[in-house]
Amino acid sequence: MKALVVSKPGNLELRDIPAPVPGDYDALVRIRGCGVCGTTDREIIRGRQPYHDAYPAVLGHEAIGEILENGARVSSFRIGDLVTRPVAIWPGTVQGGMASGWGGFAEYGIVRDRLAMAADGDASLLEDYTAQRQQTVPRAMELPQAILAISLAETASWFRHLPSVSGKNVCVSGTGIAGLGIVIWCMLGGARRTIILGRRDERLRLARELGATATINITDTSIPILQRLTELNAGAKADFFIDAVGKPDQLQLGLSLVRDGGVIAIYGVPEGQCYAALDFSTGPATVNILRPPAEEHLAYAWVCDLIRRGLIPAERLMTHSWRLDQYADAFASDGNVVKGWIKTG
């Protein structure tokens, strides 16, 4: 089968590799498409992903596929179901000299029935990161919507861990798919004001369409960001500052914009998960810094329901698609791409 392989850091290529051989608790999946992740995928390609250092590796972790056949003990999946997060090679294993970067950019993969395993006395995968995230896609979801919902469910599940934003003033830094998703959750969560920081006017316009109250283009340095924020916020600093960028300077920026007793919530994390040294003299006396987990499997069905009901404009967020042999274009794409996906089959 065809698959995208990072042969070594800095080198991505399309290769022929063996298709996975499913076991008794596995379902064989025809992978139909996989989302391009601007963070994890690119970190693996560059050799800078802290949880992944094995190469060559099959890339891709936001895949959707169709069940082709079930192993003898599979009971949670049905032939014809669309499923989330199929993998060409199970994480932590090596097949034919290939490591797993999950392997969603491939023609075939597997999902593993952790519930059937547990029913037979093997509970080893009940809390497994990958197995938990392999679930059936709700019916009536189109393929691009189902892929998009993976990204949105990550931020939705993360957002659920925050204190309530109802009636609060929220500042979101970042206009990528994560930041835009968080704008939606702030709007649905009843935030009084949601002000988003970004660099591209077209993304800031999209943020306003999605529910942002106001936007600040931070490339305009004629007026300090804090002054512009308080002018938009009735003279007040933010109750919440949300980092959806993942750059080392974001925590310092948050300290300057959040009120005393406010919350800095970290979604984006810098490469190496290290922030720059902090100058607390510019910040409040008391601040709560949170880094909740993203547990997309707990929010995926809910996000799909919002998309199906038209409450999330999926067509405004999933903007680009490519064939598998156009992978170079997909990973060279510029800021015009809000979210894109690669058709694998």
Image: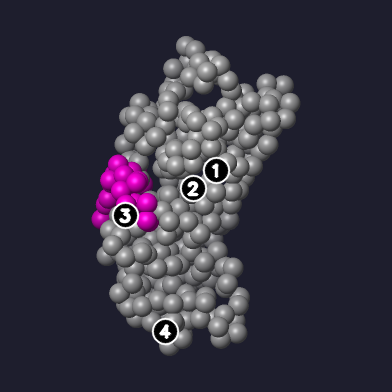
Amino acid tagged 3? Arg
Specify the amino acid type for callout 4: Gly
Q: Are marks 2 and 1 in contact (CB under 8 Å)?
A: yes
Q: Earlier in the sequence, mark 2 or mark 1?
A: 2
Q: Which is nearer the eye, 20 or 137?
A: 137
Q: Residues within 10 Å of mark 4 (few under 14, many from 20)?
A: some
* Residue under the point 49% across and 60% down: 297
For this view, does 59 lie left or right of residue 157? left
Q: Which numbered disc, 3 or 1, marks the residue closer to the eye?
A: 3
Q: Can you identify the residue that label 3 sits on?
A: 308
Q: Tell me, for residue 71, which label it has, or none.
A: 4
| Residue at figure coordinates x 54%, y 29% from the top left | 169
Looking at the figure, which quarter contains the C terminus? bottom left
Residue 13 position, x and y percent, is 36, 57
Marks 3/1: CA–CA distance: 26 Å
Give the number of the disc on residue 255: none
Q: Is tag 2's residue or tag 4's residue first in the polypeptide sequence?
A: 4
Q: Which tag, 1 or 4, sits closer to the chain's start?
A: 4
Describe residue 191's horizontal placement relative to residue 12 as left or right: right
Q: Pick whichever, 93 or 135, lies toward us.
A: 135
Task: Calculate the distance from the C-alpha at mark 2 to the C-alpha at mark 1.
Answer: 8 Å
Residue named by callout 2: 155
Q: Which residues are magenta?
A: 304-333
Crowd band around label 2 with a 10 angstrom C-alpha radius: few (<14), some (14–19), many (20+): many
Mark in front: 2 vs 4: 2
